[in-house]
Amino acid sequence: MNKREKIENLNIEIRNCRRCRLSETRTNAILGEGNIDSKIMIVAQAPGESEDKEGRMFIGPSGKVLDELFGQAGIRRGDIYMTNLIKCKLPKYRKPKRDEIESCSPYLDREIEIIQPDIIVTLGHFASSYILEKYFIEKPQDFKQVYGRAFYTKSGKVILPLRHPAALLYNPELKDVMVEDYRKISTVMGELV
Ligand code: SF4
């Protein structure tokens, strides 16, 4: 089975998944999208209202911010593969619960296995925390210190945790630091070439 077929099979499972309570409140389970041959995988937290309705990733207000940050960093959506830690909308934008992460994260693990990215860019606390733990990377006590810093796994992957684009919607004063941090995606890419 080739990569495309493996991802399509996985996506059929995700679309029909009822493993956790979030299946009762979603409209669509949101699938990963983008370039399956990309060396960069972006891992966000979970779809929002707009994404849930339309069935696509990052099409709401956070998506606009993400596109702006990507634009400043010289990255196009078509260059990367994007997915979520949690595939279904979290009601009222609440945080994901531990059992929801446990139910849904095996899908992300399988995406990583299929896509084989060299760089995993995690957006926000939950996605960053999950991926750092998955690769046994110790987190600093003050979690904010992970943002914009590259971590290296034993197998040579780079993990780059960044603030979630939604953070800029609530804290516009983060703009300069976030623009600078998102530019590090290109820097890390350059180092791996
Ligand atoms: S959040 Fe994940 S585990 Fe829960 S129903 Fe959706 S796809 Fe399944």
Image: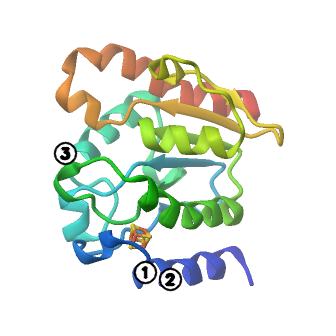
- Alpha-carbon distance for marks 2 and 1? 6 Å
Q: Quadrant of ligand 1?
A: bottom left
- Alpha-carbon distance for marks 2 and 3? 28 Å
Amino acid type, label 3: Pro
Q: Nearer the viewer, residue 72 or 164?
A: 164
Tell me if mark 2 has few (under 14), some (14-19) or many (20+) residues whose alpha carbon lies within 10 angstroms of its own: few
> From the Cβ of disc 3, is ligand 1 less than 8 Å away?
no
Q: Position of residue 91 (x, y in %)?
A: 20, 59
* In the rendered image, the vertical position of residue 42 relative to residue 112, given as above or below: above
Q: Nearer the viewer, residue 5 or 85?
A: 85
**Which mark is nearer the camera, 2 or 3?**
2
Amino acid type, label 2: Glu
Q: Tell me the quarter of the picture where residue 150 sits.
A: top right
Which residue: 66% across, 49% down? Answer: 39
Q: Is residue 84 visible?
A: no
Which residue: 48% across, 65% down? Answer: 104
Q: Nearer the viewer, residue 193 or 61?
A: 61
Amino acid type, label 1: Cys
Is label 2 in a helix, a strand or a loop?
helix
Mark seen at residue 61: 3
Which residue: 50% across, 78% down? Answer: 11
Q: Position of residue 130 (x, y in %)?
A: 55, 45
Q: Which residue is mark 1?
A: 17
Quadrant where the image shows the C terminus: top right
Which residue: 31% across, 75% down? Answer: 23
N-term mark: 2 or 3: 2
Q: Which residue is mark 2?
A: 13
In the image, 32: left or right of 2? left
- Alpha-carbon distance for marks 1 and 3? 26 Å
Q: Position of residue 136 (x, y in %)?
A: 72, 38
